[in-house]
Image: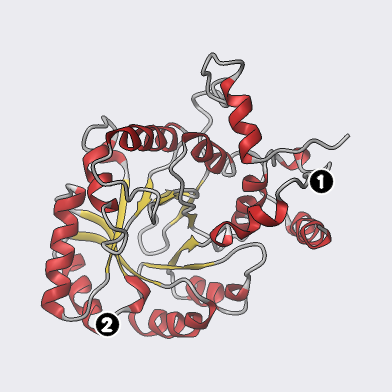
C-alpha cells in the first residue's frame, strides 16, 4: 500500500492531536546528519544547511523572528551549521545576526554571506556592513554573488583570507548559463567554494562543473534544490514510490535532497525555509541511506512517470 507524504501532512502529524510534539522528537539526540570534507582544508561540513533568501527577510517582526529562532534551533539540533545569506536578501543578514547572537550555539555555526556590488571600496564597505549585521568578528565564508565584478572582489577576498578576516572565499550563480564562467574562475583563481544550481531535474552541472570543482579542490554548495518550489507543485497530491521508505525517504523534500546528496561531489545543499517542520524535514535528508546509482536512476524514472 502506498502512503502519501507531503509537507502539509507532516505538519499535521507533528501536531499529534494538539499536544505540540515535534515530528522527530523520538529521534535519538546523537543522530546527526553526515558531513563532507572542504577540500582546501579538510574541515568537515554538514551536508544540509539553510538558505535565507526571502525566508529571513522579516525585518523587526517579532512573531516571525520567534519562528525563525526555532528554525535555527532545529537545524543545529540535527547537526546542521551552515547559514547562507547576502546583502541582496533584504533584512536577512541582520535577522540572522540578531537571532544567532541570542542562541548558546551561535558561535558554533558556519556563517556564509556574499558581496553584491561593483567597485573595490563599495565592496569593502558592503562586506564590512555584513560583518556588523551578522555580528561576526570573523566570517567563515564570503562569496561573490552572481559573479558581480568578480575580478575586483577576488583580490580583496584573497587578501582578507591571508589576513584571517575570513576563513574561506567563493563564487556563486544560480543559472546553467553561468556554469562555464564558474569553471574558468575555478581553474584560474582556485576559490575554496563554488555555489550553483543543481536539482533532480536541473542537472547541467553534471556535464563538467562538478568534475572541475573536484579536480581543483573547490567545495560545492547547492542552491535551487527545489527549483523555486516547482518540484513540489509537480508532485502535489502524488504518492511516493513504495520503495522510498526502504531508502529512508519519507517525504518529497527528502526525495529531492537525497538525490542531490547522492552526488559525491556535493558538499552542502542549502534549501531555504521559514518553517521549523520543514527544517526538520530538510535536515532528515542527511540521515540514513544515501541513494546509490541504481536508486538514483529509479528516482529519475519515477519522477518522469508522474
Disc 1 marks which residue?
A: 241
Q: Is residue 45 visible?
A: yes
Q: Position of residue 130 (x, y in %)?
A: 19, 58
**Are discs 2 and 1 less than 8 Å apart at CB?**
no
Residue count near mark 1 (Cα–Cα under 10 Å), binned few <14, some 14–19, many ≥20: some
Q: Position of residue 87 (x, y in %)?
A: 26, 62
Quadrant location, the C terminus = bottom right
The residue nearer to you, when weighing 26 against 202, is 202
Residue count near mark 2 (Cα–Cα under 10 Å), binned few <14, some 14–19, many ≥20: some
- Residue 149 falls in which quadrant of the image? bottom left
Quadrant location, the N terminus = top right
Residue 172 is labelled as: none
Marks 2 and 1 sit apart, C-alpha to C-alpha, by: 46 Å
Q: Which residue occupies 32% across, 51% down?
A: 57
Check disc 2 and report its element: helix, strand or loop. loop
Residue 149 is labelled as: 2
Q: Which residue occupies 34% across, 37% down?
A: 64
Q: Position of residue 301 (x, y in %)?
A: 81, 61
Marked residue nearer the N-terminal end (2 or 1)? 2
Query: Residue 39, relative to residue 48: is it above or below?
Result: below
Check disc 1 and report its element: helix, strand or loop. loop
- Residue 191 falls in which quadrant of the image? bottom left
Query: Residue 266, relative to residue 9: is it above or below?
Result: below
The residue nearer to you, when weighing 170 against 178, is 178
Amino acid at each position: 500500500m502506498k502512503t502519501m507524504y507531503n509537507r502539509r501532512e507532516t505538519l499535521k502529524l507533528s501536531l499529534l492531536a494538539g499536544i505540540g510534539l515535534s515530528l522527530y522528537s523520538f529521534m535519538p539526540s546523537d543522530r546527526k546528519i553526515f558531513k563532507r570534507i572542504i577540500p582546501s582544508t579538510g574541515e568537515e561540513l554538514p551536508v544540509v544547511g539553510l538558505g535565507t533568501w526571502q525566508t529571513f527577510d522579516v525585518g523587526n517582526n517579532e512573531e516571525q523572528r520567534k519562528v525563525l529562532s526555532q528554525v535555527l534551533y532545529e537545524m543545529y539540533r540535527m547537526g546542521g551549521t551552515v547559514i547562507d545569506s547576502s546583502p541582496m536578501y533584504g533584512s536577512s543578514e541582520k535577522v540572522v545576526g540578531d537571532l544567532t547572537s541570542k542562541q548558546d550555539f551561535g558561535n558554533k555555526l558556519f556563517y556564509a554571506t556574499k558581496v553584491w556590488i561593483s567597485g573595490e571600496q563599495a565592496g569593502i564597505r558592503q562586506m564590512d556592513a555584513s560583518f556588523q549585521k551578522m555580528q561576526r568578528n570573523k566570517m567563515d565564508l564570503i562569496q561573490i554573488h552572481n559573479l558581480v565584478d568578480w575580478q575586483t572582489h577576488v583580490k580583496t577576498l584573497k587578501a582578507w583570507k591571508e589576513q584571517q578576516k575570513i576563513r574561506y572565499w567563493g563564487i556563486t550563480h544560480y543559472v546553467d548559463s553561468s556554469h562555464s564562467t564558474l569553471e574558468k574562475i575555478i581553474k584560474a583563481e582556485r576559490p575554496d567554494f563554488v555555489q550553483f544550481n543543481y536539482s533532480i531535474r536541473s542537472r547541467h552541472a553534471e556535464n563538467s562543473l562538478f568534475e572541475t570543482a573536484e579536480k581543483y579542490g573547490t567545495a560545492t554548495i547547492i542552491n535551487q534544490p527545489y527549483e523555486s518550489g516547482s518540484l513540489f507543485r509537480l508532485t502535489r497530491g502524488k504518492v511516493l514510490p513504495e520503495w522510498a521508505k526502504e531508502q529512508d525517504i519519507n517525504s518529497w523534500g527528502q526525495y529531492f535532497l537525497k538525490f542531490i546528496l547522492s552526488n559525491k561531489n556535493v558538499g552542502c545543499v542549502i534549501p531555504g525555509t521559514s518553517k521549523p517542520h520543514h527544517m526538520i524535514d530538510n535536515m532528515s535528508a542527511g540521515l540514513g541511506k544515501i541513494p546509490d546509482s541504481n536508486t538514483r536512476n529509479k528516482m529519475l524514472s519515477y519522477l518522469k512517470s508522474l
